[in-house]
Every structure is written in structure tokens, then in C-alpha cells.
Amino acid sequence: MELQSKKRVGILRGGTGENYNSSLQHGGEIILHILENLDHKYKTADILVDSDSIWHYNGRPVQPADLVHKVDVVWNTAQPSFSVMLDNLSIPNIGVNSFHFLFKNNRQLLKEHIKDSGVSLPRRFLLPVYQRDFDGPRETRLDSRQARQEYAFKKAKEIFEKFSSPWIVQSFTPGVGMGIHLAKTFPELVRAIEDGAEHKASILVEEFISGKVASVHSVPNFRGEDFYVFPPVNVFGSLSSLEKNKLSILARHLHQHLGAEHYQKTNFILNKRGKVYLLDLESTPNLKSFSHFSQACESVGAEMHHVIDHILDKNFY
């Protein structure tokens, strides 16, 4: 295929939000994957928005409006506001969109939309980034560590009154050094929250649910199906045929109902009683070797680049 006939795909990454680093990584993986597997069909361009909100096209500053002459489609791995901007410029785009992002980050809205689907959500408590001026004690004689400890104790008490142990405590802010804590006691919960405050992270505290964990990938209009659902990938625990079928049906329903346009990964957990919980939703596939997406493709005799080609190709028609 001649160079002139290649479709021009801009990979948009970076941005000004807290997903900056993860966007750089995901966008870089997509660029590399296309170069290695689909270079005969697509010409990639690196569109970077730096932390100062300056847009770059292959390393050179560019105005977003000028992209209309430089690319045929943009794969947005950054933030949903960029998709809105691209829509306003009539530039076709895929990836992060406002509607799906809203469901992912507005727990109450998501809960309302899935209430009749047979899927539950783990209870959770979200703490914003600790700021001593606002969250710290009025007692100014306390040093920074004592102030964090008092804050952590206060918030742990609030959580304890809402749902009992054990709790999973982790950062809700990507790219910070806070680990994942499994807190089984109240003092462990206090220490985990204190760790998050020390790392300047927004903190997600979620009830721990013991059970089988699986991810289900789905793609619209693939292989002749309105919503093609890949077989569930076991993350932890072995699923029976009935359980796999149940999760596949639920994933199809959620994808259709929540309106992910190009791709959705639905992460589930089944407890010992067979109750299904929705853990997370993702709208950008992980293109690393041995990823869950790679395993899902392999299980049906497909390659990851077949799906990527399908996602890109359908935006040109």
C-alpha cells in the first residue's frame, strides 16, 4: 500500500488531568502496536498535550483546529474534554468519551443505571487529596504527622460506620507511590488512610469481596455481531461454564446499556453465593503481551491487531 493511501491516525495522549502518566503509557503502546502490526494500512502521528496545555503534533506545537488537515481519526487516551473538542472540530475520534467516563467516575449514576441488571456495586468511600489547611485539626501545635494521624482516625471512623471490614484501600490518583492495602482491622484502616494522605493521593476505600475475579471484553459490530463478547478471562479463581455464560450475558447487557462506542472491558467478581459485583469499566484495551485482552483474543483465534484494525476501520465509513 502506498504511503499516500494510508489512513492517518493521531494518538492523543497527555493532558492536564491526573491521568497524564497513564495516558502517555497507553498512547505509546497504541502507537507501537500500530507500527508493528498495521503499518501497511495506517500512518500514526503522536499528538501530545503537555502539562501546560500546549498541543504538539509529532513534537511540534500545533493548534487543535489544524489537526483537521493532518489526521483522519484521533485515538484519545487523555481526557474526555478533548473528545468534545474534537467533535466540535468535526474530527472523528475514538477512545475516552464523556458519556462512558461519566459512568466510570460517577458511582451513583452508574448504580442507578445498572440497578435492574442483576449486578451490584461494592460499597466504597472516596476521600479527596488531604490538605492540612482544610482537613487538618484546629490544634496548630500538632506537627504534620500528628495532623495526618488525626485526620486518618477521623475518616476511618466515618468509613467504619458505613460498612465493616475488611477494606481495600488504594490511591484514586494515578501515578502516586501509594500501595494497595488490605485493612482487616480499624487500626490498619487508619494506617492505610494515613499512607494515602502522606502520598498526597485521593483515596478509594472499598469493601473487600472474596470470590472469583474475571474480565470480559466486548467490541461492537465485530465478527458479524452487534456486540461481540469475548470469553471471560479468569483473573482469580476458576469459572464454571454456567458462570462464564452468566458473565458474558451481563457484559453484553452493560456494554449495550452504558453506550461504550468502540470497546469495553468489564471487570467482575462473583462471591461464594454467586452474587455478581461490577468492579470497574475500561474503554482502552491493554495491548501488552499476556494482557487479559491478549488472552481473550487468543481464546477465539484472533490477534489484538485484528480488533484494533476493526475499531479504527469502522471510523472511516
Image (cartoon, rainbow, N blue to C red):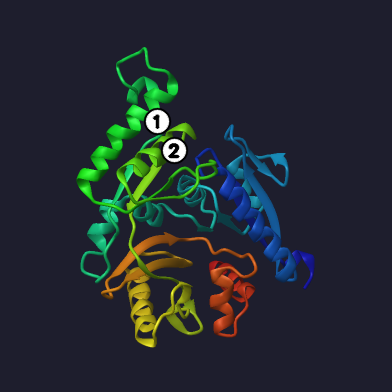
User: Which quarter shows the N terminus?
Assistant: bottom right
**SS for dot 1:** loop
User: Which residue position holds label 1?
Assistant: 130
Q: Can you tell which of label 1 and label 2 is closer to the viewer?
A: 2
Which residue in the rendered view is the most extreme toward the top?
Answer: 141
The quarter of the picture where the C terminus appears is bottom right
Query: Residue 252 lies in what quarter of the image?
Result: bottom left
Residue occupying the point 73% across, 42% down = 59
Tell me whether circle 1 and circle 2 mark residues in contact (CB < 8 Å). yes
Q: Earlier in the sequence, mark 1 or mark 2?
A: 1
Q: Above or below — where is 280 with respect to 133?
A: below
Quadrant of the image occupied by residue 295: bottom right
For mark 1, does the 10 Å Cα neighbourhood hold few (<14), some (14 to 19), or many (20 or more) residues?
many
Q: Which residue has dot 2 on it? A: 196
Residue 281 in the image: above or below residue 13: below
Q: Is residue 70 left or right of residue 139?
A: right
Q: Is residue 11 visible?
A: no
Q: Nearer the viewer, residue 147 or 136?
A: 147
Q: Which residue is pictured at 48% across the width and 85% down the height?
A: 224
In the rendered image, residue 92, in percent from the top left (x then y), is placed at 53, 58
Q: Amino acid at mark 1?
A: Tyr
